[in-house]
Amino acid sequence: MGRFNSFEEINSWKKSRIFNKRIYEITNGEEFKKDFDLVRQIRMASISISSNIAEGFERNTDKEFIYFLFVAKAFSAEVRSQLYLALDLNLLQK
């Protein structure tokens, strides 16, 4: 697996951790709180990004790590799509 000793050293995991916090801050807004299902879905997808990076790393094989990175990337697309919906519903400003 190479140059990292733990997933906490991986820059994409560090950035996804910051991103998760920001998603929670955004979804704690008064307008967002009214749409419980969207809040739950977007938070779960966001958490899945960092979780898949960590899980893939802990699998200890390059092949599985790469697979889980692709899964994390897919969850990032899901979050982006949900943010577009939130924008369309005026829950966010551009």
Image (tube, rainbow, N blue to C red):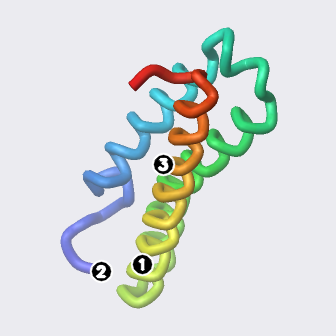
Q: Is residue 92 above or below residue 77?
A: above
Residue at horizontal 29 percent and vertical 56 percent from the top: 10
Label 3 secondary element: helix
> In front: mark 3 or mark 2?
3
| Label 1 crowd bin: few (<14), some (14–19), many (20+), radius 10 Å | many
Residue at horizontal 42 percent and vertical 71 percent from the top: 69
Label 1 secondary element: helix
Q: Which residue is mark 1?
A: 65
Label 2 secondary element: loop
Q: Which residue is mark 2?
A: 1
Which residue is nearer to you in this view: 81 or 48? Answer: 81
Q: Is residue 40 left or right of residue 14?
A: right
Look at label 1 and name its amino acid: Phe
Query: What whole-number distance in Å separates the C-alpha atoms at marks 3 and 2?
Result: 29 Å
Of the 4 image quadrants, the one containing the N terminus is bottom left
The numbered dot on residue 6 is: none
Q: Is residue 88 above or below residue 47?
A: above
| Label 2 crowd bin: few (<14), some (14–19), many (20+), radius 10 Å | few
Which residue is nearer to you in this view: 63 or 39? Answer: 39
Of all residues, the one furthest to the top in this rendering is 30
Look at label 2 and name its amino acid: Met
Query: What whole-number distance in Å separates the C-alpha atoms at marks 1 and 2?
Result: 8 Å
> In front: mark 1 or mark 3?
3
Q: Earlier in the sequence, mark 1 or mark 2?
A: 2
The numbered dot on residue 80 is: 3
Of the 4 image quadrants, the one containing the C terminus is top left
Q: Earlier in the sequence, mark 1 or mark 3?
A: 1
Look at label 3 and name its amino acid: Arg
Residue at horizontal 33 percent and vertical 45 percent from the top: 14
Q: Is residue 20 above or below residue 9?
A: above
